[in-house]
């Protein structure tokens, strides 16, 4: 009986992860689009407003590191989902 319950909860957890990941991905995508549309309020302009030295360079470094981490997370997601695809 306990083994059956564990399987049921594992299936529910696996089904719940996908919508959460999609929603989190949507948040990051919309934030990235806003950075391109409104660069003064969410891009380099924010670094200038705060008073960070070399704002253009540091904003570029921050953006590139964020992109690398985003691609790493997406690759990890697709590699985990790959065995689920029918052959």
Image (tube, helix red, strand yellow):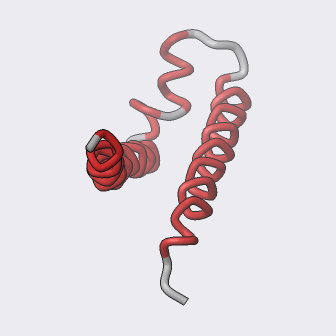
Horizontal side of 76 relative to 13 (left or right) equals right
Q: Is residue 24 visible?
A: yes
Q: Is residue 50 above or below residue 25?
A: above
4 and 47: which is toward the camera: 4
The residue that appears at 56% across and 63% down in the rendered structure is 78
39 and 22: which is toward the camera: 22
Q: Residue furthest front?
A: 1
Horizontal side of 53 relative to 81 (left or right) equals right
The residue that appears at 55% across and 21% down in the rendered structure is 47
Q: Is residue 31 above or below residue 44?
A: below
Q: Quadrant of residue 9?
A: top left
Q: Is residue 84 above or below residue 74?
A: below
Q: Position of residue 74 (x, y in %)?
A: 56, 55
Q: Position of residue 66 (x, y in %)?
A: 61, 39
The residue that appears at 62% across and 46% down in the rendered structure is 67
Horizontal side of 27 relative to 77 (left or right) equals left
Horizontal side of 27 relative to 54 (left or right) equals left
Q: Residue furthest bottom?
A: 87
67 and 75: which is toward the camera: 75
* Image quadrant in which the C terminus is located: bottom right
* Image quadrant in which the N terminus is located: top left
The residue that appears at 34% across and 50% down in the rendered structure is 7
Q: Residue furthest top?
A: 51
Q: Quadrant of residue 61?
A: top right
Q: Is residue 37 visible?
A: no
């Amino acid at each position: 009986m306990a083994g059956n319950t564990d399987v049921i909860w594992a299936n529910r957890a696996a089904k719940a992860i996908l919508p959460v990941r999609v929603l989190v991905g949507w948040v990051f995508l919309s934030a990235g689009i806003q950075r391109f549309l409104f660069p003064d309020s969410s891009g380099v302009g924010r670094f200038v407003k705060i008073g960070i030295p070399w704002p253009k360079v540091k904003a570029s470094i921050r953006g590139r590191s964020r992109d690398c981490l985003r691609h790493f997370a997406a690759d990890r997601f697709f590699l985990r989902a790959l065995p689920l695809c029918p052959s």
